[in-house]
Image (cartoon, grey):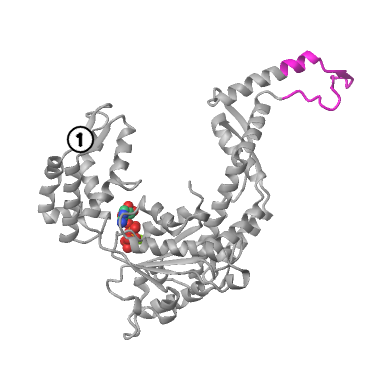
Amino acid sequence: MLDSTFLTPQQIVQELDKYIIGQFEAKRNVAIALRNRWRRMAAPLEIQKEIAPNNILMIGATGVGKTEIARRLAKIADAPFTKVEASKFTEVGYVGRDVESMVRDLAEQAVSLVRSQRKEAVKDKAAEAVEDIILDILIPPLKDSSSSKKQDKNNYTIPIDQSDKVLNENTRDLFREKLKRGDLDERKIEIDVKHFSNVGMGIVSPGGMDDASMMNIQEMLGSIIPKQHKKRKVSIADARKILLDEEVSKLIDMDEVKEEAIKRAENTGIIFIDEIDKIAGNHKSSGGPDVSREGVQRDLLPIVEGSAVSTKYGIIHTDHILFIAAGAFHFSKPSDLIPELQGRFPIRVELNKLTQKDFVEILQTPKNALTKQYEALLAAEGVTLSFNEDAIEKLAEIAFEVNNDMENIGARRLQTVMSHLLNEFLYDVPEIITPNAHIIITKEMVETRLVGLIKNKDLSQYIL
Ligand SMILES: Nc1ncnc2c1ncn2[C@@H]1O[C@H](COP(=O)(O)OP(=O)(O)OP(=O)(O)O)[C@@H](O)[C@H]1O
Ligand SMILES: [Mg+2]
């Protein structure tokens, strides 16, 4: 993978192009925002603190790539990423402080990101340790290192027979090889598993108590209740996994991980706030649900503006987190948001409606294109799947028509259309369509399977 720290805006767009078709404006702006963070970090300290992130508001109908762009961007940046639906905060039972949970989620993501990177670094070392543990269980070493002596039943110390020792070591070497080859994976051994006893301790948050205090209580309880050791009989293959986790934890300094995670969340974190249009109330009509919507906006404000949020890993300052908000804005406009919040999302990008031609491309070119996904699924059964060019065109045309005739759900429509098209094949493999078969999807096939269906509106409403 490319080193994301040095990706230029153009390179970021190129990376995004591998997954998202069109939407150049949106890609360009998120790329600039990402590069600006790196630029900011390289700026002199006094000015660094002043530079605010370029929060972005993406406006576009459903299924045109808003979430996909943000998600891929985070991947490219190797940045902690979390996504929330703004509308969830307007639901019944919402308490003000809940909005901060998005920052806690981000902290959680950052910790798991950093932890998995650290894990990668110590994995080999941990695996070696695990091998030693398993080997010791299978063929315990002769304990003679200090004195080269052992005691007989009368407590007289007698020298270990050197040949015993050689035999023991040779056997261990032999088994080490077998272990490495995986020859012993099926064999059962008994291992010591540290296990955290929290049976029957599901804590129900009392109303009014926020997540942070709840987490502290849980952590406190965790440290009071002793970890229990438990013997478990498992296969060597499973033992490897269980023990590897434990060894990795021993080798990773969690305090360092937390510290680094907080730093990453603060400086490179991306929070994606979806459905922001659903909390944009119309100022003129007061009362009713608008009050709670505006309330959510007011709660969001300090977070987006920069505040300190306490998380289980430490305090996170949100000043330099990149916020990307998105919404369809069918029933409200960005100007319906409270002015303070509008000001915090200075970059507006509109995503285009996808065309039939875009659909053709989306079906086949992205790295995760639907056709590639189904080809891989069937390849797992030894069956080759391929699509004729005119079949793809027909599929795109049908998806486009269904979007026009019914609800426009963007590229998501391709999924329902494709799944309906391939349903029977997926069922017939491997009994009727046997391995080594080659399924070629033709235009005619698409027509016979789908055209009848789209003509019957009542039916297609449910199926497509
Ligand atoms: N421009 C695009 N290029 C490639 N694939 C796309 C594009 N737009 C959408 N898709 C596909 O459609 C799916 C849905 O898109 P996405 O989740 O980005 O929608 P959205 O714009 O966030 O919609 P919503 O407003 O409903 O959240 C994606 O998982 C992706 O596979
Ligand atoms: Mg979305």
Whole-percent x, y for residue 197 in the image: 61, 48
Residue 154 included in the magenta stretch of the image: yes
Residue in the picture at 22% in, 33% down: 439
**Depth check: 249 or 232 in front?**
249
Q: Residues within 10 Å of mark 1 (few under 14, many from 20)?
A: few
Residue 453 included in the magenta stretch of the image: no
Which residue matches tag 1?
440
Q: Quadrant of residue 351?
A: bottom left
Residue in the picture at 61% in, 22% down: 177
The mark tally for this picture is 1
**Ligand 1 has an atom within 8 Å of the beta carbon of the residue at disc 1:** no
Residue 415 in sight in this render: no
* Residue lying at the far top of the rendered structure: 163
Whole-percent x, y for residue 95 in the image: 47, 73
83 up-or-down from 436: above or below: below
User: As drawn, is 28 to the left or to the right of 237?
Assistant: left
User: As drawn, is 197 to the left or to the right of 286?
Assistant: right
Residue in the picture at 41% in, 59% down: 70
* Residue lying at the far right of the rendered structure: 156
Residue in the picture at 63% in, 21% down: 175
278 up-or-down from 83: above or below: below
Whole-percent x, y for residue 148 in the image: 84, 22
Residue 169 in sight in this render: yes
**Depth check: 189 or 242 in front?**
242
Q: Quadrant of residue 316?
A: bottom right
Highlighted range, magenta: 141-168
Amino acid at pointer 1: Ile
Whole-percent x, y for residue 398 in the image: 16, 52
User: As drawn, is 144 to the left or to the right of 406?
Assistant: right
User: As drawn, is 422 to the left or to the right of 368?
Assistant: left
Describe the element under mark 1 as helix, strand or loop: strand
